[in-house]
Image: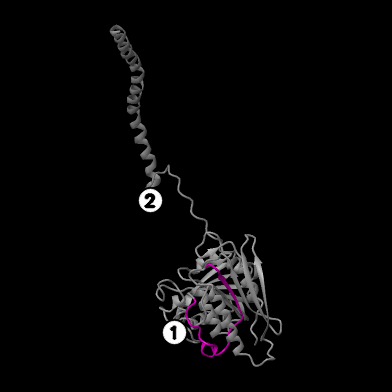
Amino acid sequence: MAARRRRRGSGSLSAIWKAWPSAAAPRRRRRAARKVAPKVVVRAPKAAKTPAKVRGVVSAPAVKPRAPRKKAPAGRGASRAARYAGAAGSRPYHCYIPSGLRRTTGVPLLILLHGCLQTPAEFAEATRFNQLADRHGFLVVYPEQTLTHNLQRCWNWFDARHHERSHGEPAILAGIAREVMAERTRWRIDHDRVYVAGLSAGGAMALVLGATYPDLFAAIGVHSAPPYRSATSRSGALTAMAGRSIVPPAHAASMSGIAPMILFQGRIDSTVRVVNAVRITDQWRSLHERRLVGDRDPDRITRQREITHLTASGRTSTVTRWYSASGRKLLESWQVERLAHAWSGGRKGVPFSDPQGPRATTEMWRFLSGHRLNR
């Protein structure tokens, strides 16, 4: 047995010994490779230094750079930056001139007010109003709220200093509209077809303009905003957005009525609660009825219609429309299911934009373009 064990043991050792050369061969090859390797290592950096010095790139040239995110098309037209300065203050603004615009023909003007934490460019990308302007031939103006006047770029709809005609931001924005309307070289604006629309804080300021300048704006568009004068200070803004503030009566809120309005509101909006949609339409009707001459006024509301709208994605909306005695559609409200605090039907992948629809941009322009000032 011992002999067998010795033979097995020696057999095991011999097996290992026989296997050793095969294991040592790669080792010799690795050593040989090490001798050749420095020639490759020396050449590689020399080839990489030239583009690195020219381009200022620190990373290795073999790494493929990440493709940048595709930006939204800005439209086929041209843009122009300007700045308005008046007695109430100044703000920069951006004009979008649609492709094929005729300089000798009066065209509509749309003022668009971005929301908090947005820039005019981001709002244009989310809503795609520039592309719609190319299709329908109207001029778009994007006023810009600066960090100097609000650290979150919000229009100051909640501040009592910006609630009245000829004061504060309403006067500045009306001044921008009039400055663009006065242009006669680059374009010509039809003064009876000037509109304003906005999202969130921009929507609230559009509502302020509709109440303070109904003689300037033929119609307004409001998306996800609280009622006019529902807050009079910064501390009261959150209370108003939650729908818990007191809306002032018609005789205290406005002296000149309010422009025709289309409203969009998401039902699951946790920033501006859905109850604000009802509060705004009730306020609008109160302000509108206050300026009527009598029961025979052709602009008095005589009919209301409610329908259910269904998008291709399966999202439903409750749409309520109010009509005057003359058949004009003066007020329209969209309450959209499963829509949070975002532009309905906006561009995909953009903040404060929900691509599922319905398309607020299309519906708003359909409503706005159907109205003219009664001069």
Q: Please report the bounds of the magenta region as a residue range.
A: 243-268
Q: Which quadrant does the N terminus fall into?
A: top left
Disc 1 marks which amino acid? Arg
Q: Which mark is residue 56?
A: 2
Q: Earlier in the sequence, mark 2 or mark 1?
A: 2
Whether residue 244 is in magenta: the answer is: yes
Q: Residue at x 32, y 25 (%)?
A: 31
Which residue occupies the extreme bottom position in the image?
Answer: 294
Q: CA distance from mark 2 to mark 1?
A: 51 Å
Within-10-Å neighbours for mark 1: few <14, some 14–19, many 20+: some
**Above or below for 248 versus 347:** below
**Above or below for 46 versus 157:** above
Q: Is residue 159 left or right of residue 197?
A: left
Residue 360 point in image, percent of width and height: 60, 69
**Above or below for 172 versus 18:** below
Residue 206 point in image, percent of width and height: 53, 78
Q: In this orientation, does residue 318 appear?
A: yes
Disc 2 marks which amino acid? Gly
Residue 307 point in image, percent of width and height: 67, 71
**Above or below for 375 versus 183:** below
* SS under mark 1: helix
* SS under mark 2: loop
- Residue at which label 1 appears: 161
Residue 225 point in image, percent of width and height: 52, 75
